[in-house]
């Protein structure tokens, strides 16, 4: 055989790029707000009426008049305002579907504090008129191109036992002016960030645990503890729902509770889930580089605030990172033989197989606990700008992209080339027996066993099947066209905001 015919393509992801992680500045900002917790002095009558009031889907209202300062002859500002408001609308639809709450008593939504909430001057009308709202948000923007936050949020007025009544969300024009909002994947990331920030307002904050109430409307007894974990003093949240779910999820019956982030300064530590034990969660301190999950950890926390009558379990997104991994996974040293972690070197796929990735530490990784970090130009669900989306990769390696593509560890190539094992994007389907059928060019390979190694006749190399096929087939699906920027994605199914309909929310209703 003539070896010179074999072109040795160096198809490694040296072309792949990483993006800055967007970190949350929630608590940094929170410290600069004038917070006020108020006692509502209800008479017995008002109290009885309140207890007899039926809960409703949470109604979050907003005031965007701050945006009237923008010069609207500049199309960049027009797009910024439009997309900020749309992202807000999608997030508010999500919370309306997620939470029910007993409306506050008459008069309780009247603003009775200082002149501003965050950067926004509170309109006089809000001081004299009550609102048909469960939470009112003043929306602002800043122009800070050198910062890494896209948005931040916090509450300004908080009614003891009842929860937040007024808050603010601030968008960073400095970063968002460069965003390609015509791409629904980019828009979807903004929705994820707004949802994260509003979740803080709703009570997800280390500072707010003291205000949460139990079913008797009393503060929780010992809601947190501090443990030395992997060399760091870590706050453990041990309120009832969170504790029960953490024990069940990790398979550790004596676990004290779920860990809050133990690194990253005031903006991150203590007000997010610990990156080392749960990844890709909406309430991690850095926004997921691929798909985020609003998991049962976060809904359990919202239940433990005591502010909401119900939290819709149907919207909990299943996570698998660390699931059933036992107590040592949560409190012990990281085992880099587990797929959750990695040791430096090879380029593989991220934990959920969404993207080609590399093993790297992040700001929030505990020592020895690096994760596979997705490259920004190598998400298999994103064909645009994907470094593998070129004729060579497509023709010689059979890669594919889109809604039903995932990253597989593979060295498969047609006979004319030879490649190293790496993460490659292929289309796939799962059948009802949780077999994974992978499309490699015009060939199909079937994974019917965990970690099985499969080959294609007359092709070079092999493909390593996912570690747990049953879990793989139940990882969150992305939505058709990412709901066209007109809805949120509920495990592959679009939930459109009012005014839109269709499987991908692309039709006006
Ligand atoms: C508003 O923006 C337009 C377009 O960028 C610019 O020409 C105009 O001078 C701006 N107006 C003001 C008052 O800044
Ligand atoms: C953890 O906290 C304890 C008690 O405050 C302190 O004595 C200890 O030095 C801390 N350890 C670390 C590693 O920060
Ligand atoms: C992968 O699926 C997308 C549609 O989701 C399709 O356009 C593409 O041709 C497929 N690629 C391969 C190699 O099957
Ligand atoms: Zn945050």
Image: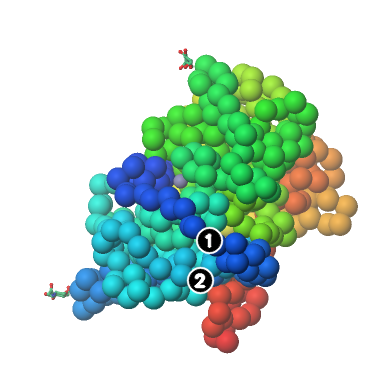
Q: Does the residue labelled 1 lie within 8 Å of ligand 4?
A: no
- Callout 1 crowding tier (Cα within 10 Å): few <14, some 14–19, many ≥20: few
Taking the view exactly as shown, the residue that stands out farthest to the bottom is 509
Seen at 54% across and 29% down, the residue is: 235
Q: Is mark 2 on a helix, strand or loop?
A: loop
- Callout 2 crowding tier (Cα within 10 Å): few <14, some 14–19, many ≥20: few
From the viewer's perspective, tell me whether residue 12 is left or right of residue 278.
left
Seen at 46% across and 70% down, the residue is: 107
x and y, in percent, of residue 419 in the image:
59, 38
The numbered disc on residue 42 is: 1
Seen at 55% across and 56% down, the residue is: 162
Q: Where, by quadrant of the figure, is residue 21 drawn?
A: top left
Seen at 67% across and 28% down, the residue is: 256
Q: Of 466 and 105, which appears nearest the observer?
A: 105
Q: Is mark 1 on a helix, strand or loop?
A: loop
Mark 1 vs mark 2: in front: 1
Q: Is residue 438 above or below residue 257?
A: below
The numbered disc on residue 495 is: none
From the viewer's perspective, tell me whether residue 489 is left or right of residue 30.
right
x and y, in percent, of residue 461 in the image:
69, 38
- The answer for how far apart the CA atoms under marks 1 and 2 are is 10 Å
Q: Of 200 and 123, which appears nearest the observer?
A: 123
Residue 108 visible? The answer is yes
From the viewer's perspective, tell me whether residue 204 is left or right of residue 182.
right
The residue beneath circle 2 is 106
Q: Quarter holding the N terminus?
A: top right
Q: Is mark 2 within 8 Å of ligand 4?
A: no
């Amino acid at each position: 055989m003539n070896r010179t015919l074999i072109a040795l393509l160096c198809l490694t992801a040296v072309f792949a790029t990483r993006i800055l992680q967007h970190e949350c500045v929630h608590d940094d900002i929170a410290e600069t707000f004038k917070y006020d917790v108020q006692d509502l002095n209800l008479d017995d009558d008002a109290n009885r009426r309140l207890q007899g009031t039926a809960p409703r889907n949470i109604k979050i209202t907003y005031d965007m008049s701050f945006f009237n300062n923008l010069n609207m002859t500049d199309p960049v500002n027009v797009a910024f305002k439009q997309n900020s408001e749309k992202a807000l609308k999608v997030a508010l639809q999500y919370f309306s579907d997620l939470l029910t709450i007993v409306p506050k008593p008459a008069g309780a939504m009247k603003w009775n504090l200082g002149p501003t909430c965050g950067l926004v001057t509170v309109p006089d009308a809000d001081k004299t008129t009550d609102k048909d709202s469960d939470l009112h948000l003043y929306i602002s923007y800043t122009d800070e191109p050198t910062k890494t936050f896209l948005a931040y949020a916090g509450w300004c007025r908080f009614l003891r036992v009842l929860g937040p009544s007024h808050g603010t969300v601030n968008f960073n024009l400095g970063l968002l002016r460069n965003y390609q909002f015509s791409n629904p994947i980019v828009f979807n990331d903004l929705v994820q960030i707004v949802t994260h920030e509003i979740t803080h307002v709703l009570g997800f904050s280390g500072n707010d645990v003291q205000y949460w109430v139990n079913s008797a409307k009393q503060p929780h007894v010992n809601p947190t503890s501090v443990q030395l974990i992997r060399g760091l003093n870590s706050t453990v949240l041990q309120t009832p729902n969170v504790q029960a779910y953490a024990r069940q999820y990790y398979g550790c019956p004596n676990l004290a509770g779920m860990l809050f982030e133990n690194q990253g300064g005031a903006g991150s530590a203590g007000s997010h889930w610990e990156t080392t034990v749960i990844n890709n969660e909406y309430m991690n301190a850095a926004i997921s580089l691929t798909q985020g999950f609003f998991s049962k950890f976060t809904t359990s926390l919202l239940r433990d605030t005591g502010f909401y009558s119900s939290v819709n379990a149907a919207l909990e997104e299943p996570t698998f990172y660390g699931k059933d991994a036992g107590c040592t996974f949560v409190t012990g040293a990281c085992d880099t033989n587990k797929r959750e972690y990695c040791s430096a070197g090879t380029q593989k796929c991220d934990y959920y197989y969404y993207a080609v990735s590399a093993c790297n530490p992040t700001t929030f990784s505990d020592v020895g606990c690096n994760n596979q970090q997705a490259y920004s130009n190598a998400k298999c669900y994103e064909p645009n700008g994907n470094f593998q989306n070129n004729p060579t990769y497509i023709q010689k390696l059979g890669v594919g992209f889109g809604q039903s593509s995932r990253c597989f560890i593979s060295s498969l190539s047609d006979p004319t080339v030879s490649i190293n094992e790496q993460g490659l994007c292929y289309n796939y389907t799962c059948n009802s027996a949780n077999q994974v059928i992978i499309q490699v060019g015009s060939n199909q390979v079937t994974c019917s066993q965990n970690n099985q190694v499969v080959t294609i006749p007359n092709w070079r190399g092999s493909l390593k099947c996912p570690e747990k096929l049953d879990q793989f087939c139940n990882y969150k699906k992305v939505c058709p066209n990412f709901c066209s920027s007109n809805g949120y994605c509920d495990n592959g199914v679009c939930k459109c905001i009012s005014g839109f309909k269709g499987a991908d929310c692309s039709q006006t209703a």
